[in-house]
Image: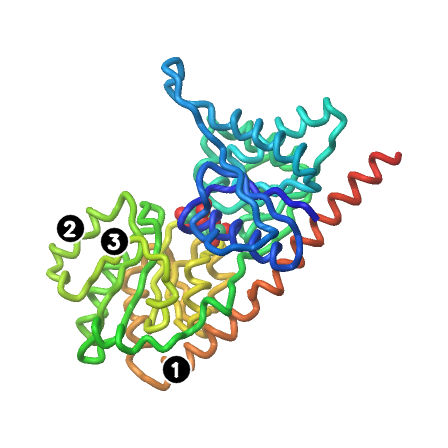
Amino acid sequence: MKIGIVCYPTFGGSGVVATELGKALAKKGHQVHFITYSQPTRLDFFNENLFYHQVDVRTYPLFQYPPYELVLSSKMVDVVKYEKLDVLHVHYAIPHASAAYMAKQILATEGISIPVVTTLHGTDITLVGKDASFAPVVTFSINASDGITAVSENLRTETYDYFNITKDIKVIPNFVDLDRFKRQKKEHFKRAICPNDECMIVHASNFRRVKRVEDVVRVFDKVRKKVPAKLLMVGDGPERSNVEKLCRELGACEDIRFLGKLEAIEEVLSVADLFLMPSEKESFGLAALEAMACEVPVVTSNAGGLPELNIDGETGYVLPVGDIEGMTEKSIYILSSPERLDAFKKRALARAKEFEVSHIVPLYEKLYQEVLDKQKNVALS
Ligand code: GMT
C-alpha cells in the first residue's frame, strides 16, 4: 500500500506515534510518505520505503498568521496525485483532518478518490477541540473521515460526549517498540546520578500545565524524606521555570536534575526504579508505556486512558488527579522493598508486551484495507 501520514513532527505524543507507525509500516513493505512542516524527530533511519515531503509555509506581509492549513492541503493534493497514494492517515484532528477534507474535495474534481483515516490523540479533543472556536470544524472533519480511531476507550467516549459524531470510532491504542525500549546495562549512568545507590525516579513530558509537573516535584520531595532517591526530569516546556523555582523553594535541587529534551530516553529509563505521571489529562500516556517496557513501574493519575494502561496495584498505582499524599504513599510502598519493586518491574514489562508494535500495526493495516474496500464498493455501485 502507499500511505500518506500527516502529523506534527513533535518530540513526543502524536508525532511519535505517527512516526513509529510509519517506520513499522515501511519495514513491512508499505511505501510511507510523511507530510509535515519539518522532519519528524524520530524519523531517524533510512529505509527505501520512507519518504518525507516538507510543507513550506511562506510568510508574506499581508498574513499576520500564515495559512498553514491551506499549504498543507495543497501539499496533500500534490503528494496523493504524483505519488499515487492509496490512503491518507492524519494524526491529530486540528488542522490535519480538515486540511485532508479539503484535499479530498480538490482531488475529487480531478476524478481521484482517496480515503482519509483520522486518529484522535487527546488534546485535539479534550482541550483544543472543545474550544468553541474550533468545535464545528472538529465535528465536521471527524464525521467527514472515512475511518476514525482513538487511542483509548476513554478518548473514544469523550469524543462522543463532546461532539456530535455520527460515525464509528475504533480504539487502536498506542504501541511500543520493545527492541528499542528495553532495559539496557547502563550501570555507570546509575552510579553517576545515584552514587549511594539511591532509587531513581523519572518524569518525562513536554512540561505543559496539563502534565502537573509541580506534583511530580512535590511527590518526590516527600518520597526522598523516607527513601533515599534522585529525580530525573526529561523534556522541556512552558512550566519548566515554575518547576525549577519550586525545587529551590523546597530545597530539593541537589536531588533533582533537569535533562531537557533527550533523544535516547530509553537509556534513562533503563536505570529508573519508578516513573511518575500525575497528568490532569492523558488520553493514553505513551511515555508511561515506554517506561513500563523498560521495566519501570508507574505511579499515575487516573486521568483519561491511564487506568486502561496502568493496572492499579500490579504495574504501579493509579491515584486521583492532584492526590499528592496518595502518590507519595504508593511510591514509597513500591520503592521500600527490593523484592516488591522487582515484582512490580516484571509486571510492568509483561503489561507493556501487550502493546508491542507488532500487535498494533496490523490493526491500522486492517482499517486501511476496510476504507479502501468501502471506497471500491462505492465506485462500483
Ligand atoms: O501529551 C502531550 O501533551 C502530547 C500529546 C499530543 O497531542 O501529541 O499526546 C497525546 O497523544 C499521545 C499519543 O497518542 C498520548 O499518548 C498522550 O496521552 C496524549 N496526551 C494527552 O492526552 C494530554
The amino acid at mark 2 is Lys
Q: Nearer the viewer, residue 355 or 9?
A: 9
- Label of residue 342 in the image: 1
Q: Taking 319 as reference, is 70 left or right?
A: right
Residue 120, by quadrant, is top right
- Which of disc 2 and disc 3 is earlier in sequence? 3
- Which of disc 1 and disc 3 is earlier in sequence? 3
Q: Residues within 10 Å of mark 2 (few under 14, many from 20)?
A: few
Q: How much space separates mark 2 and mark 1, taking CA atoms?
A: 34 Å
Q: Position of residue 8 (x, y in %)?
A: 47, 41
Q: Residues within 10 Å of mark 1 (few under 14, many from 20)?
A: some
Give the structural element (helix, strand or loop) at label 2.
helix
Q: Residues within 10 Å of mark 3 (few under 14, many from 20)?
A: many
Q: Is residue 79 depicted above or below 300 in this figure?
A: above
- Label of residue 245 in the image: 2
Q: Is mark 1 within 8 Å of ligand 1?
A: no
Q: Position of residue 352 (x, y in %)?
A: 51, 69
